[in-house]
Image (tube, grey):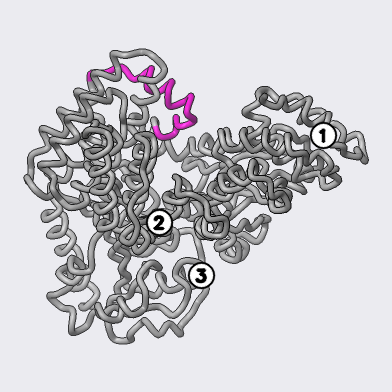
Amino acid sequence: MEIEPKSFLEEHIHIKAESKAQYYHIIKALNVNSKADFYDHGFELFLRKNNAINKSWYTKRTIIELSKYVLKKENYKLFGYLIDDRLTEVNSDELLGIKLDLIYLKKEYQRIVELYEQYQLPVDYRLYASLINLNDENYFYQNDLNVTSLQLIKRLANIINSRLNLNVISHELAVYLYEKLYFVIQREFNGKYIFELERLKLTLLMFSGSYKQACIVAEELINIETYNIDIEFSYALILNYYTKVETPYSRTKLLNFILKRIQFYSSVKDDRALRSYWRFVSKISTIVSLSELQEVFKDFELDSLRNQAKQEHGEYVFKLFFESVYSCINSLTERGAFSIERFTRFYQGSGNNTLHLFSTKNINYQYMLSAAYEDYNDQDFINCDARFYEIFKRNFPNTNFIPLSRPVNPQLEGEWFMDDSLIKNIENYALIKPIDLNLERIDFKNKRKNGWLKVLECNNFSCIEDGKINVGISIGTGLVNLHRRIYNMDHEMVKDLFNFDLDSNINLVNLDYQFDDELIKSIGYSQPEFDLKNDMDSLLSLMNKLDFLVIIPNSMVDAASSVAKTAFVYDPMHRLSYWSYSNSNEFIMSEHVKYITGRTIKDTLENLKNNIHNQVKKLSKN
């Protein structure tokens, strides 16, 4: 039996309405548009805002029914913070499985392993999945896989594949587990074909660089699964590797494949095909240039694609692809508007202040959107990543900022917009709006030339060497998956770029937080002594002291733009072609940030080396 939200609240929750306004919010919460909206947003916020909750409704039946719904939605946070304490008190075997599922959704993998040991439970998916997430090689090498169903093989293959893509488990462990699962299929299920296992095989082949074999597997999978965008993108990714690494200069096969898929998707008008159509276009944009994307679309009507983008709240991305970068940036408010509306629809504010919100998930937008903050006043309150609070407060003293810490294991989109403290005070704002960056309204030309963030003057960076040319290096990201690897450089590539003058007057300074001190020192870089991930004030101050930067398409592009620092961006995939200024190789937000590309990775590196060499000569003369 599924619980109806209205009857559930009326029966089990008793709140003393201290005012008509509070009563109004309760009534609003009981009259939501759909059960999904209620469970995803209304009920959680409703409970967070009202502390006078009678917990007598914690019956065994209620816990089971609520937990089933939570598990179905795969969202622990809907009710987890309310029922977890109660579950701790319950020893019923009937509830133990629910408790394990909820803990797994919380991603407390070590706790799962400990509970299995404590209760001597038989091995099942939850334990295996937790061990995979913990990258526990010893367990798997010392114990046989107890796999008794094809369904379990499918689930394990999927989780191994996803964790390998996210670089959570080692390639060696993934290969070992694949071989074990393949052996079980041969022994127990007569070698029955399983799509999920073949998909894992494809990822393993791509990781190992066996592109020819990967192509064969991908082509077979595409013929089996018509709408599987992940497989189609993997195939496109392999062809892209061919053109950038294996077979220089030939893009024909890749572009023909993209054209063929667009022809297919544009001819099928059902909802599933349209969703897949937009997702496919979004993914392939990451491996082809803007001009290539627009070329394959030149003979296709775009109305259905635009409508699908609107439905998925991504029309600003559509504008980036098919209109202009200006149109995209001026429409960035769309990125936050939908989530804000869903997350706040149950509340009615008062007063004169306006709350401006944007997702704090992507750090690049913290830099970019701040170009508009001087237009706000003392009645405006803007949410921000807490790491930027002091920077913004110092640069824009007439505006109010609300610092948000990054959520741990977020499962609701709204957690990137608000925290509990902000939610409890939400009625203090008359209006809630997305942050708006409009290039026509700000002093765009001046900001492109001079930046827009003033940094703290600091002269005690030990990583800066007087008398040398100090160059900041950012060659990766904290999250490195199979897809992102081709955007990155490795340290050997960097050494080659600078090897013409490495031992004399150049000092390379690491800007990537994911590399430890020992590795950086062994390579010969200088390592800053502050927290590169969290101390944004020091990071911007250091960047301001450096002579120039060599970076990849990551948040450093926006950081360099904000302080008008010269930066050369290694961009073999033409990522910044979508964000270029007037079809130049300059980033839209700064004339000092230039993306360097080429027909192949080798060409790109050579072009980058030439730009670095010219910059060094220019600085040496001065």
For image coordinates 26% across by 56% down, the residue present is 171
Q: Are marks 1 and 3 in contact (CB under 8 Å)?
A: no
Pointer 3: residues within 10 angstroms few (<14), some, or many (20+)? few
**Labelled disc at residue 253:** none
Q: Can residue 289 be seen in the rendering of this structure?
A: no
**Labelled disc at residue 555:** 2
Pointer 1: residues within 10 angstroms few (<14), some, or many (20+)? some
Among the two numbered marks 1 and 3 on one chain, the one whose residue lies closer to the N terminus: 1
- The residue identified by callout 3 is 535
Locate residue 580 relative to residue 100 in the image: left or right.
Answer: left
Position in image of residue 293 (x %, y %): 25, 32
Distance in Å between CA atoms under marks 3 and 2: 14 Å
Locate residue 592 relative to residue 210 in the image: left or right.
Answer: right
Q: Which element carries disc 2, helix, strand or loop? A: loop
Q: Amino acid at mark 2?
A: Ser
Q: Amino acid at mark 3?
A: Asp
**Labelled disc at residue 12:** 1
Q: Is residue 306 magenta?
A: yes
- Magenta segment, prevailing SS (helix, strand or loop): helix
Among the two numbered marks 2 and 1 on one chain, the one whose residue lies closer to the N terminus: 1
Distance in Å between CA atoms under marks 2 and 1: 47 Å
Q: Is residue 113 magenta?
A: no
